[in-house]
Amino acid sequence: MTQPDAGGGPLGLFGGTFDPIHYGHLRLAETAREALGLERVRLIPAGQPPHREAPGASGQARLAMARLAVADNPGFEIDPAEVEAEQASFTILTLERLRAALGPARPLVLLLGLDAFLGLPAWRRWEALFDFAHIAVANRPGYSLDSAALPPPLATQLAERQATAAALGEAPAGRIVPFSMTPLAISATDIRNRAASGNSLRYLLPPPVLDYISLHQLYL
């Protein structure tokens, strides 16, 4: 899909292995787009995730499935650069690339689930992420981030940076904004296991993705 202009409102960034992309991923992205007032959400399939085993499908297959999954939603777009780079995908390098391409003023919003946010101190150059983007954290409804329950370095960042969605358009980076969503109990691991066992994947994935998996006999 075509890339947007460098100007504009807050752009959500949602990276992942997407092996395969499923309704849980898409629901998080759509909820974030609405709750945070994002102009668009850019999904970024990882090329070679550095902290997990090799994906079950090739980068090109995962990229193709992601494109099929978002084709009918003008609020979503796909960034193929990590797959095309064919090297380890680190979030800080992705943000550096996007900031260079989109300019210093565009608000960028990195979308994370709560589990990923709690693990942030283990990421490469994690504190530098705030120099390039805001971070939005998907919480369960009725749940709020509690500094007392966070690792001390992360608690310090939350205390200094927590804001509301309205703040995302006021600066290009640097805020932490929680938002609520009801997670769907769908996992890519379960989908791969179901495919390997010959079980139905219907209603877990968008139909075009389901058709792609069947056509190319993925995850068998």
Image: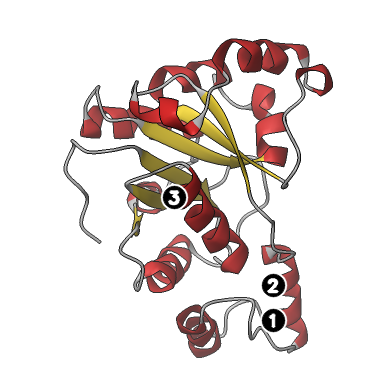
Q: Is 23 situated above or below 128?
A: below
Q: Residues within 10 Å of mark 2 (few under 14, many from 20)?
A: many
Q: Amino acid at mark 1?
A: Ala
The answer to whether any part of residue 46 appears in the image is no
| Labels 2 and 1 touching (C-beta < 8 A) | yes
- SS at circle 2: helix
* Relative to 34, 189 lies left or right: right
Q: Amino acid type of disc 3? A: Arg
| Residue under label 1 | 195
Residue at 30 percent across and 28 percent down: it is 99
Q: Position of residue 158 (x, y in %)?
A: 64, 18
Nearest to viewer (mark 3 / mark 1): 3
Q: Is residue 92 left or right of residue 49?
A: left
Query: Which residue sits at x=23%, y=33%?
Result: 102
Mark 3 and mark 1: Cα distance apart in space: 30 Å
Dot 1: within a 10 Å radius of its alpha carbon, few (fewer than 14), some, or many (20 or more) residues? some
Dot 3 crowding, Cα within 10 Å, few <14, some 14–19, many 20+: many
Note whether residue 99 is visible.
yes
Amino acid tagged 2:
Arg
